[in-house]
Image: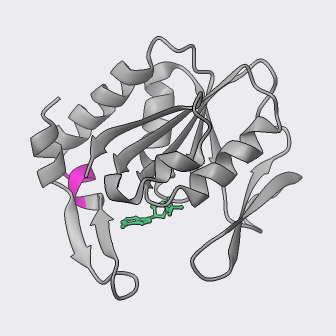
């Protein structure tokens, strides 16, 4: 994998969605056919030997590479969504954000104790979103939980929110 090339393909958008945020736009990576191919191959190499049975994508940018990776791994795909979007019975977890709180939900029957789960999102910032996703997934008591990001923003040290024995990996570090 040519990490330099992938990193260069990510567009930085200053002050989006609010002043002070340097938004990492992955649409410029996804629209480039060779970058998209390299990224999906890299993800597959990272997880091909883990026995993953379910890839859980976090709304909404986890819904892009999540199903692509699930297909390559021969695993199922499960969406973890914002409140009110999933039609059947759900479990949920709330978490603190910079202003106020947020909640994520998953279908009650989405994961079983026999699953090996890979949680996937595009970017690790403070870690709040994925920490809630991790807690929610733990309630299903699956065999193992892996955590993946396309991008980790190193200086925010979002990794610190996870247990030391959690399997947290990012394809690219900025
Ligand atoms: P956090 O909970 O702080 O780790 O934030 C992670 C979530 O917010 C992910 O779903 C990201 O898509 C999004 N996010 C946070 N910061 C950024 C950023 N600088 N650029 C792009 N997405 C971001």
Main SS of the magenta part reads helix
Number of numbered tags placed on the structure image? 0
For residue 97: magenta? no
Q: Position of residue 118 (x, y in %)?
A: 57, 32
Give 76 or 83, whichever is nearer the viewer.
Answer: 83
Give 97 or 142, whichever is nearer the viewer.
Answer: 97
Residue at 73% from the left image edge and 19% from the top image edge: 143
Q: Quadrant of residue 114?
A: top right
Q: Position of residue 166 (x, y in %)?
A: 58, 31
Looking at the image, residue 35 lies above or below residue 106: above
Can residue 110 be seen at all in this image of the molecule?
no
Q: Position of residue 72 (x, y in %)?
A: 43, 23
* Quadrant of image for the N terminus: top left
Can residue 98 be seen at all in this image of the molecule?
yes
Left-right relation of 58 to 41: right
> Quarter of the picture for ligand 1?
bottom left
- Magenta-tinted stretch: 28-32
Give 11 or 131, whichever is nearer the viewer.
Answer: 131
Q: Quadrant of residue 2?
A: top left
Residue at 52% from the left image edge and 15% from the top image edge: 50
Q: Quadrant of residue 104?
A: bottom right
């Amino acid at each position: 994998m040519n990490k330099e090339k992938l990193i260069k393909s990510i567009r930085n958008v200053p002050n989006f969605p609010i002043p002070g945020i340097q938004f990492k736009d992955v649409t410029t990576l996804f629209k480039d056919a060779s970058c998209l191919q390299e990224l999906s191959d890299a993800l597959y190499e990272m997880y091909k030997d883990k026995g993953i049975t379910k890839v859980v994508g976090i709304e909404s940018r986890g819904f892009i590479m999540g199903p692509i990776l699930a297909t390559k791994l021969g695993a199922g795909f499960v969406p973890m969504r914002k409140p009110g979007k999933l039609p059947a019975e759900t479990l949920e977890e709330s978490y603190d954000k910079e202003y106020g709180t947020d909640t994520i939900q998953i279908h009650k029957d989405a994961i079983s104790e026999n699953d090996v789960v890979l949680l996937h999102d595009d970017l690790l910032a403070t870690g709040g979103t994925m920490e809630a996703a991790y807690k929610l997934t733990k309630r299903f008591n699956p065999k193992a939980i892996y955590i993946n990001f396309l991008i980790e923003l190193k200086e925010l040290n979002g990794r610190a929110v996870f247990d030391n024995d959690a399997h947290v990996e990012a394809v690219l570090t900025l």
